[in-house]
Image (cartoon, helix red, strand yellow):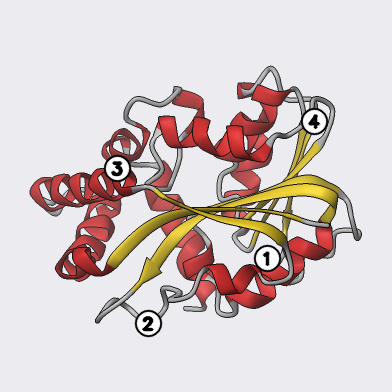
Amino acid sequence: MTGVQIYDEGYRRWRASTKHCALFGADMPAEIQPFSFVPFDGMEFVSSLLELPAGGTLVDFGCGRGGPGMWLAARAGASVIGVDSSRVAIDDANARQHDFPGLVSGKFVVADVADTGLPDHSADAVVSIDVLQLVPDPAAMTREIARVLKPGGRVVVTTWEASGAMDKRFPRDVRGLFDGLSDVEMHDRPGWLSRQIAIYEQAIEGDDGSDAAIADLAAEARKQLPYRDDMRRVAVSAVRL
């Protein structure tokens, strides 16, 4: 299977699993239905960094099923454009807009986060939740973010910075990926890592072979937990001049 097909199949499993939703969505409004390790107070922190204006447009890079981006936009009374490579995720996002009554409008498109096809300077703000480490060329994604942002627009990206023997797909110089933007700030979020480890441990404990989505997560957990000391959990904020 191609990478996109793998994600399509994954989203079908994840959306069908109440256990998976419960693990990632604990303490969150039910409509968010996240697939990330950012907790609800982390979502509020991301919102505060974005400074998304009412009536503005948020572009969500790697939006998945759309919940986090729609929640952020609805909270600000703004619109969202979501971009993801998975058709399954995009179809779900388009079907779920009614769950966010504060959302001005939503549009979700199948596209590469490194080549979205969106117009220059079309976003008042950009967000990307736990996607950067999944992208073959993270620098191309951050260049695309800079192209799409309006002057003065803010971006917030959540990810991991690796060290030691951590999986090579995780970036080792996150700040350096944002050289094309200004006011780059790295925000350490150790509590997010603690939540991730707890979710991993619960997935391993609950993996009895009856739930494919939990089996996926448990397999990831067994691979990543040995490197917990080599993971730095961060949010990055920056501004386009």
Task: Report helix, strand or loop for mark 4.
Answer: loop
Kindly identify which residue carries mark 1: 113
Tell me the kind of residue under disc 2: Lys
Residue 161: horizontal and vertical position, in percent? 40, 67
Answer whether labels 2 and 4 touch (C-beta < 8 Å): no
The residue located at (66%, 39%) in the rendering is: 50
Task: Specify which label sits upstream in the sequence, 3 or 1.
Answer: 1
Q: How many angstroms separate mark 1 from mark 4 (CA)? A: 21 Å
Task: Specify which label sits upstream in the sequence, 2 or 1.
Answer: 1
Residue 105 placement: quadrant: top right
Tell me the kind of residue under disc 3: Gly
Q: How many angstroms separate mark 2 from mark 1 (CA)? A: 20 Å
The residue located at (83%, 64%) in the rendering is: 147
Task: Specify which label sits upstream in the sequence, 2 or 4.
Answer: 4
Kindly identify which residue carries mark 4: 105
Task: Report helix, strand or loop for mark 1.
Answer: loop
